[in-house]
Image: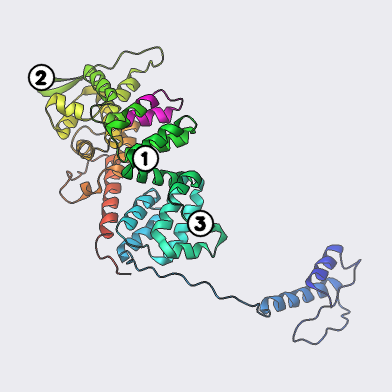
Amino acid sequence: MSTWHDLVTASLIGTERSVVPAVAIPGLPPAGDDTGDPAAVLLDRAALLTAARRAGRRPDRAEPLPVCEPDSRPAVSPAAAARLARMLSGEYPDLLAEWLAAVTARGLRPPPQLLPALLDRARRAGPANAMLMRLVTEAGGARVSWLAGLNPDWEVAAVPALAGPDAWRLGDAGQRRSYLVGLLASDPDAARDMIRGGWDAAAPAERVMFLSALADGLDPADEPLLQAALDDRSEEVRSRAANLLARLPGSAFGQQMAGRALRCVHLEHAARGPRLLVTPPPAGPAQRDRTRLLFEVVAGTPLRTWTDAFGLTAAQVAALPSGAWAPVLFTGWSRAAIVQRDHDWMAALLSRALTGRPPGTPAEFEALRQLGRRADPLLAAPGTLPEPGLDTPPAVSVALTVLRFRYDMLKELTDDPGAG
């Protein structure tokens, strides 16, 4: 008897030049010759055969699915699961990595029904954000490995994580960084020798990885390497090295930047109270934008410079009026607070934005956005920061909303664990 392919062929050739093939429909007697319109006959037989094909077929032999290993970790609370669903639906998706890291650190597990969506999100992020897939794999545990074995799209999550020297020789950037961080904790001299030995042959992205690993346990012994990195070909490497040197107490670079900063910014005790007088550094042949120069000096200066020199707290320094240079100081201090991981200064700058001169430049808006994502979430606890007023600028409100979202997000991982 004819098949579906024969009907398709007849329809393409045309019933004027081809006989309409007969078809056998399971459960129906064979159709006799039909003297009607050949085109209508072909469509009728195609409709019958379509219905028969859709009705079912003899089942194939099915193999049972592998059994997932049990996961003894308690599930996150229902509130935390609901928040994860909101993030996966588009509400602050950039905070997923923070949520997953916090889940793993607390010994919890995500809700199983959301693991496919997490795996899809990590897969779409691609190799450029391999860390997200690693975080999903760590937080999801055995269930993620089981799911990854069932779907080729998720197979990267099923690859066993490399450990020990194999992670350094054969692993991806995230695995190499994890190995290096562990070695810095257990044998810092060997880790630094490894970095120095591989520095010249490493690509810029790998040198940035070296510096990010050093940031987790910065030590005075790192200063020679960081100082040499200031002359690196890559602008990002130079910037990362400068940020770390600014964090390193007593570094020659930090002292140099502090000297430059205090030549630009002076504390004046005027009749109306203390204020900052700002004189940007002179422009040079390579950099003629004095505003940009001032920002770079302030951003690269150790924050303790200001409190030590002026004898004031971070909040008091941030609140000092500085005239037309206030936006540059605010953005420079914000960058310094983030890269130096100084939460006192982050709190001071957020308080300043709430109670002082309203931010008005795009650079200040971006600084506030970063502060909302990098400041200690505990700043959003009731009574910690000043309450926003009706006239609070939208950019400040947005930063506080993100900060509160992070505070609630982490609080839900502490409250009522194991409810799932």
For the question of whether residue 360 can be seen, the reply is no
For the question of whether residue 174 can be seen, the reply is yes
Q: Earlier in the sequence, mark 2 or mark 1?
A: 1
Looking at the image, the residue that sits furthest to the right is: 17
Q: Is residue 145 above or below residue 300?
A: below
> Alpha carbon of mark 3 to alpha carbon of mark 2: how far?
66 Å
Q: Which residue is mark 3?
A: 159
Q: Which residue is mark 1?
A: 213
Which range is magenta? Answer: 227-244
Q: What secondary structure prevails in the magenta region?
A: helix
> Front-most of 96 and 368?
96
Between marks 3 and 2 in the image, the one whose residue lies nearer the viewer: 3
Find numbered disc 2 in the image and state the secondary structure of the residue it sits on: strand
Task: Specify whether 216 is left or right of 60.
Answer: left
Find numbered disc 3 in the image and state the secondary structure of the residue it sits on: loop
User: What kind of residue is marked 2?
Assistant: Ala
Any mark on residue 270, and which?
A: 2
Q: Earlier in the sequence, mark 3 or mark 2?
A: 3
Q: Is residue 77 above or below residue 96?
A: below
Q: Is residue 232 magenta?
A: yes
Choose top left, top right, bottom left or bottom right for residue 196.
top left
Q: Is residue 8 above or below residue 61?
A: above
Q: How many marks?
A: 3
> Alpha carbon of mark 1 to alpha carbon of mark 3: how far?
24 Å
User: What kind of residue is marked 1?
Assistant: Ala
Q: Is residue 53 above or below residue 416?
A: below
User: What kind of residue is marked 3?
Assistant: Val
Q: Is residue 187 magenta?
A: no
Looking at the image, the residue that sits furthest to the left is: 271
Choose top left, top right, bottom left or bottom right for residue 361.
top left
Between marks 2 and 1 in the image, the one whose residue lies nearer the viewer: 1
